[in-house]
Image: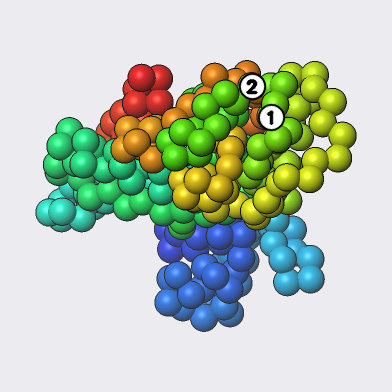
Amino acid sequence: MNNNIPLRALQIFESCARLESCSLAANELCITQSAVSQQIKLLEDYFLERLFHRNAGKITLTESGFELRQRLAPVFYDLNSVCASLVPDMGNEVRVHSYTSLAARWLVPKMAKLRREYPELNINVGMFQDDIEMSDMIADIFIVTRECQDGYTIIPLIKEKLVAFCSPSYFEKNPNITIDNLFQHSLLYSKHKDYGVDWESWFRHNEINFGSLKNVTIFNHNMLAVQAAIFGHGIVLGLEQTLQVELDSGNLIKLNLPYCYSGYNYNISYKSSRKRDLRIVRIVDWIIKEFSS
């Protein structure tokens, strides 16, 4: 190993390791893929170690490559922090992404309060329907149900508790909704390929033999089922935190029925290498506080 540290090669390696692609790294750095390959070869010659496994155009880190990436992550973070501190307003955006329902019905209603507490930050809220592989190319903070991912700090927020709701107009027509007569009511199902059918989980949890239900309407997303409940089409199950805005506005009421836990836990997550980023820490702490309240 010589004494001339290949700094450009280290930058290119970090991009390849983070994006898991030489072509994407080339696009990000505005250089050719051939130049990327040459710099990675230079770095491997410098360390006398293979840094990537290459298979059918895909790259994965070797043990040496993984160790190098882990050691470089805080170094590049500190460099980015230094640059951000020297350029006004360069680092005032924090991207918070979560599932569609949680983003639309919990994050968005909280935006005014969040802006009042942190007026210096621009909060970028995004949403996704299916569980995703977290990446700082997508967002800085994620609220997800996944419980682990390399390089990420994951903090539990809340267990998903399914509670029954209906509209005031539906309840006015059906004031006596109980477990015994529940089968007489219109049940709004939220059926999703990753999360199963919520009412069936509710029946099993409460040891109720539901057999073959007929008076049901099925939706492929909980937001649609909730919207149908708001229009008075039946009873829906939902996470109380995400539907608090509908309770406060009078669009929905919570029924005096048992609840059940779905088995999914919501967690807040961010890149472990950014644990010293005060913007990230402040927003993470704020979201944890709001969920607990």
Q: Is residue 82 left or right of residue 203?
A: left
Q: How many marks?
A: 2
Question: Label 2 neighbourhood size at 10 Å, few (<14), some (14-19), many (20+)?
Answer: few
Instruction: Name the residue at 80% across, 22% down.
Output: 208
Q: Are marks 2 and 1 in contact (CB under 8 Å)?
A: yes
Q: In the rendered image, which quarter is residue 266 located in?
A: top right
Residue type at mark 1 is Leu
Q: Position of residue 190 (x, y in %)?
A: 65, 46
Which part of the image, by quadrant, shows the C terminus?
A: top left
The numbered dot on residue 82 is: none
Is residue 76 visible from the viewing direction of this image? no
> Which sits in the foreground, 77 or 34?
77
Q: Is residue 81 left or right of residue 160?
A: left
The numbered dot on residue 178 is: 2
Q: In the rendered image, which quarter is residue 281 located in?
A: top left
> Which sits in the foreground, 134 or 164?
164
Q: In the rendered image, which quarter is residue 241 located in?
A: top left
**Mark 1 sits on what residue?**
182
Q: Position of residue 30 (x, y in %)?
A: 43, 77
Residue type at mark 2 is Thr
